[in-house]
Amino acid sequence: MDKLGLGYETLSKDNPGLLYCSISGFGNDSPLSEKPAFDVVAQALSGVMSINREAGATPNRLGLPLGDMAGGIYALFGVLAALVERQRTGKGQRIDVAMLDGLMGMLGYLAQIYFVTGKAPEPVGTKHPNIVPYGAYPTKDGHVIVACLTEIFWRNFAEALDMPELTSDPRFAEYSARLENRQVLEDIIGQRMRRDDNAYWLDRLTEYDVPSAPILDVGQALEQAHTRARDLVGKTHHASVGDMEFLRTPIRFSGKPLDGASPPPLLGEQTPEVLSRLLGLNEAEIGDLIGDAVISGKKAS
């Protein structure tokens, strides 16, 4: 944009209140700034890919493009914060967001583990580096997620297993002891849970108030009762493909219900409207741009 004469420094001279947000792979002042970036590149450089696997397995890309999405999420935070600042001072600013920074900003306790211990966290798959029991446990016909983040949940889980004696066993009674004896405890839990199927365990863990869940595929997730109750799936009509479903925003406001969403526009479909409404171009000027192939579209008859 600087090469085109449309960089922040140029535009802000005429509009000091300008909020100018850029999202790139590595930001403006990184030694990697000129390197092309995609989601998988950001995932590899952030450390995320190194821990997204079972121990000893090949590093995996996250199944969703979080490297791409993290940039958009932090860009929104930045624009909103800058908007509040402008309301206070009248001054705009440039918001510089890097995909890699966004993913690293989501490392959370994984970064802190390194800062405290000096060692990079090891991959543990669905398990947790600092909490046991936690993660996917095998059943007779699949796996069930269990997450005992507190001692109360650990005691509840032991009761659900019909093994309350685990909570008084010196190897597992305390948080630190369970970490030291992780594999022994994991083996005991696995042997017990393999005796019954997913349905049994999901009912029983709910009965004993143990945080748990089945592992759904994308289709099951989109069709589950929660998704319908939260109205997360909307419907609209697209000019080319007809009726289509889409995911609504996960944000809910108390003031008014969400408006119906419009379908993705066709290439150039909204260009004349944008030029007219936002830039004030008249029909003849827009027609000239179309005729000169500056924009796509059809001239008005």
Image: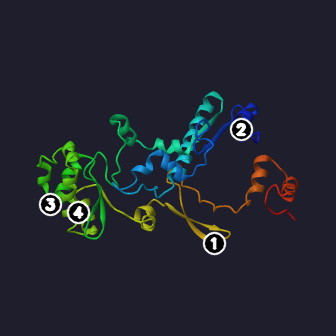
Specify which label sits upstream in the sequence, 3 or 1. 3
SS label for mark 3 = loop
Position of residue 17 relative to residue 171, above or below, is above
Position of residue 33 relative to residue 187, above or below, is above
| Tag 1 residue | 242
Q: Are marks 4 and 3 in contact (CB under 8 Å)?
A: no
Q: Please tell me whether mark 4 or mark 3 is closer to you in this view.
A: 3
Q: Nearer the viewer, residue 92 or 163?
A: 163
| Tag 3 residue | 162
Q: CA distance from mark 2 to mark 3?
A: 66 Å
Horizontally, residue 299 falls left or right of residue 169, namely right
Q: CA distance from mark 4 to mark 3?
A: 11 Å
Horizontally, residue 38 falls left or right of residue 51, namely right
| Tag 2 residue | 7
Label 1: few (<14), some or many (≥20) within 10 Å? few
Q: CA distance from mark 4 to mark 2?
A: 60 Å
Position of residue 62 relative to residue 22, above or below, is below
Task: Give the amino acid at mark 2.
Answer: Gly
